[in-house]
Image (cartoon, rainbow, N blue to C red):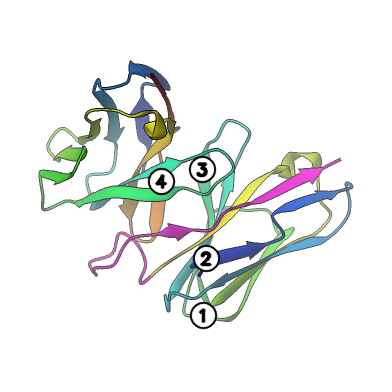
Amino acid sequence: GENVEQHPSTLSVQEGDSAVIKCTYSDSASNYFPWYKQELGKGPQLIIDIRSNVGEKKDQRIAVTLNKTAKHFSLHITETQPEDSAVYFCAASIWGKLQFGAGTQVVVTP
Amino acid sequence: DTAVSQTPKYLVTQMGNDKSIKCEQNLGHDTMYWYKQDSKKFLKIMFSYNNKELIINETVPNRFSPKSPDKAHLNLHINSLELGDSAVYFCASSTTLTGTAFSGNTIYFGEGSWLTVV
């Protein structure tokens, strides 16, 4: 089955700096790669996603890149703000199963 | 309006009891899921239903029995609760099965149900 690894497990950044989270997946048939943000006491919320036929996608301060050959994808957050502090999950999807990475606790300090 | 709503939000119960968590989505989606998040925040799929039919059962013990009376509802019943069942359970939905060739793969999660077994 699919296995998703996510690094780092924790990430502390100064407000205004960039944050990068990296994930790798094992099953080359995976074709959908969403990123979720989970705030304390809440459910995961989709922040951006990318499909296998696209190499990069951007939405304001958030961007995701996908390298299908190397089977890795990354989340980039620019100009970080305190409200970006949360746990971020990457995931890879194949035939109904969304396999999550272990999560990255992002802390943005003012 | 809440897209995916689940009740109760908090549940504390004793070992051996039977409990249910209810889930409803008002997004018109065909597919619903249950995910379990353990104390280390790891999220793992338990079940998925597509149009009331079980599609995925991810080697979950028989004590867990999902029921889908219609495609807008997917309830989770747990028999003979054990200490290890303590976790946050998330209901979710999507237009179709995620990861298939169809579009609309986005999965929307509910706010979670915190289950504590004592």
CA distance separating discs 2 and 4: 20 Å
Residue A86 in sight:
yes
Q: Secondary structure at mark 2?
A: strand
Whether label 4 touches label 3, CB < 8 Å: no
Q: Looking at the picture, which amino acid does disc 1 mark?
A: Lys
- Mark sitting on residue B43: 3
Residue B112: x %, y % from top left: 60, 52
**Image quadrant where residue B95 sits:** bottom left
**Image quadrant where residue A20 sits:** top left
- Mark 4 vs mark 1, foreground winner is 1
- Give, as a single range, the part of the protein colored magenta: B95-118
- Label located before the other in sequence (2 or 1): 2
Magenta-drawn stretch, dominant element (helix, strand or loop): loop
Left or right position of B59 against B29: right
Residue A30: x %, y % from top left: 26, 50
**Which residue is labeled 2 in the image?**
B4
B102 in the magenta segment: yes
